[in-house]
Amino acid sequence: MNSIPEHPTLSRVFRMQWEEAQNNYVLLYPEGMVKLNQSAAEILKRCDGHRTVADVVRELEETFSVTGLRDEVDDFLCAAAERGWLG
């Protein structure tokens, strides 16, 4: 299992963008595309290499007026790291 970087960032292999045809955010990479759900997109938008995981969680909780997102964000970031999405 890959560990979560302290300051997660999207791998250089991937590029995240809004895809009008998909009406969704996607991750583009040389072999294809991954359609992201809203939660995944909101997390990955904040993975800029400057924010810590705690910063990402705090911003999400403030933006969406919820609490207790740490475990879900950690689970997603672990899965993203395993898929090679994080650099």
Image (cartoon, rainbow, N blue to C red):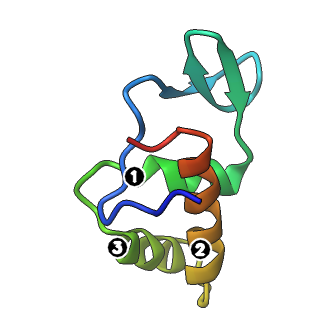
Q: Horizontal placement of 35 versus 61: left or right?
A: right
Q: Picture quarter containing residue 28? A: top right
In terms of depth relative to the viewer, which is nearer, 85 or 59?
Answer: 85
Q: Which mark is residue 47?
A: 1
In terms of depth relative to the viewer, which is nearer, 26 or 78?
Answer: 78
Residue that appears at 42% across and 72% down: 59
Q: Taking 73 as reference, is 66 above or below it?
A: below
Residue that appears at 60% across and 48% down: 82
Residue 42, how many percent across, how many down? 56, 54
Q: How many neighbours does mark 1 have within 10 angstroms: few (below 14), some (14-19), or many (20 or more)?
A: many
| Mark 3 residue element | helix
In terms of depth relative to the viewer, which is nearer, 60 or 70?
Answer: 70
Marks 2/1: CA–CA distance: 17 Å
Q: Taking 46 as reference, is 51 above or below it?
A: below
Amino acid type for the residue under numbered disc 3? Asp
Q: Picture quarter containing residue 53? A: bottom left
